[in-house]
Image: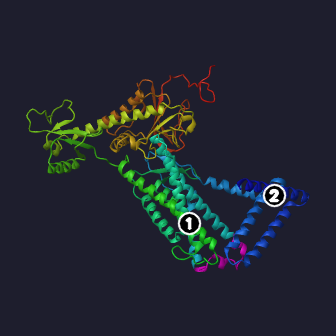
Amino acid sequence: MERGAARACVRLALTMRAIWVQWLKATRGWNANVLSLLGWAVLAALAQAWGEEAPTDWADVGPLLVFGLGALGTWWWHREVGLGWVHEGGVWLRRWYRRALRLRPRLGIDFRRTPPVPSGIPPGYWMGPLLALGLGLAAWAATAWAPQGLRSALVPEGYLAYLAVIALLWGFALWLTAFAVIFVFAQLHAWFELRRRLSDGARGHYEAHLHLFLALDLVLCWAFAPTAWAMGFLCAASLVCGLLWSAPQPEREAQLWRNARGELRSLSVRRRNLLVGAWPLASCAAVVWLLRGNWFGTATALSSMPVSAVLAKICAWSCAAGAGLLAVRQVVRFVRDFLTHPARRHPPVVHVSGFLSEGEQRETKRALRRQGLSARFGGEAQAHHVAVRIATDDPSAQREPAGQTSEPRWPLTIELADLHSGARRVLLFRRWQTQCRRVLLRRFQALYKGATSQAYVYGEGFWVGMQHTSFPWLMRDQWEDDETTRGQVLDGGMIGRPYRDVFPATVRQYYHQVTRDVQVDLIFVGDGVRFSGLRLVFQTLFELHDVYAGEVRAEEHHFAGIHNVRVLIQDVEAEAAPPRSLREPDYTEIGRARILLVLPNRGKDRERRTVPATGDHAPVLV
């Protein structure tokens, strides 16, 4: 059966090719431009005569297919003999395409945030909202002007005009449907791929089952579920996305771009999300209204436009599925940022051991909360907790006097009254800082050594931005192929596990405070830097924060003397040009930042040399 169908398709293609060759031979020497335009005029006249007598839009499918085949044949004809009007039309389209590409700005993340940059929206970002606004106004006008559907109102005025409008609406609806379906399945595949790489386990059968279930569910909704349910779900998901996109952020995130005059402008991430994410949802709602006449009732043009009503239902349910998944993503991100955002305040945790009654525990929680701390009771103290032990009435128990100057022993034995009064508050905060540094260095060492154990083909080093949500992983400055890194580097150059899974939220908050006070936005670690040198760089940053408390920013001379490491500081978007002798990282996604470059110190006159390798990256003898 399948072989017979394949042979029939091959015979049909060969027959069409033979007819096309005979047509070219027969028309050789004729004026191809006049002949092609005459053919299009005949097709238009036949379509006009056909469409005026057709009762429903089922008859519109035939003319659209014929026009599509005619466009394909014209293109083939143009490739053989060269049609002047097709060439001019192609030149005009390419010219407008290049103009549209120039409207797309180059965006870079603003890590500095000071001094403030005037806000502005790139002109290209207005195209989507203007399209959605135009479709919305057309749907509102069609409600009063064509209450029985577009066909009943436009066909008497001219069938070709109606056919052009319905072709645009059908094409846009199909594009929205394809975009929404691909978005849903691509996001699920990316999530399964991430889980598979993080857990080192195969989840292919779960992914296949989920994809099959969603595909069947979507087909059932297309076939049986009413369009009103889809529009209700779409409106609810759009409302959730809009509220979360416009919600205040713990730290303002913005991107920089330059206008046609070269002036620097700032675009907030919240405004960008609203402009980019809202217009497809609004456009879907407007297209559904235009094709079926309403959202929640029976289609007003169902008798004359059944194809449009079916296509509107398919588009509505597809966009509803995409909007639902987008809303779930935004809710998960909002909750995750609330719990783990580095810029959000996470009080240091004091783990209190010893016997305390319920009343004493409640009083201890209130007292520590007034001091900017939080209390935990029972269980084992975690690495970033400040462990204290309540002194008992046993005279043999060792107590730490409140006025001692020697280094205390931890867990700290303390009187309950001193803990409530805040007499040891400074000591507890200092211990918390020490614990945060130890956790950060210990866990980042494991993350960094796992990253440097891989072989890389592209890029010059790693980006370290634990205090930013835009750099949620340890990242390469350029993407790597899966074949070269054995699947250990995700898309975007992400390596290892995300920072939120490696470091507690309070540790990242402390690191955010340190880097903000010393004015270091990002750290770039070049290939070849050992962690022993990188540890000294981090310790220098911590000492600067302790000594100057944000009054002095980090400079290059503060890192002088670190063995086998060369530290430079570079201001992106500064007037001074960076030194050309360095193998610089890729700054494509950075708009403005103060970057700490940690590079291997190979000597003043030594250059980086590469070893010749074969195709499988194995060194060869020279």
The quarter of the picture where residue 82 lies is: bottom right
What's drawn in magenta, residue-wise?
A: 144-163
The quarter of the picture where residue 481 lies is: top right
Q: Residues within 10 Å of mark 1 (few under 14, many from 20)?
A: many
Residue 508 appears in the figure: yes
Left or right: 132 as drawn, with respect to 304: left
Q: Secondary structure at mark 1?
A: helix
Q: Which residue is mark 2?
A: 16
Which label was assigned to residue 222? 1
**Camera-side residue: 76 or 534?**
76
Amino acid type for the residue under numbered disc 2: Met
Instruction: Verify whether residue 158 appears in magenta.
Output: yes
Q: CA distance from mark 1 to mark 2?
A: 36 Å
Dominant SS of magenta comes to helix
In this rendering, is residue 315 above or below 8? below
Q: Position of residue 301 (x, y in %)?
A: 61, 77
Q: Tell me which residue sits at (54%, 75%) in the image.
A: 294
In this rendering, is residue 344 above or below 430? below
Q: Tell me which residue sits at (45%, 33%) in the image.
A: 450
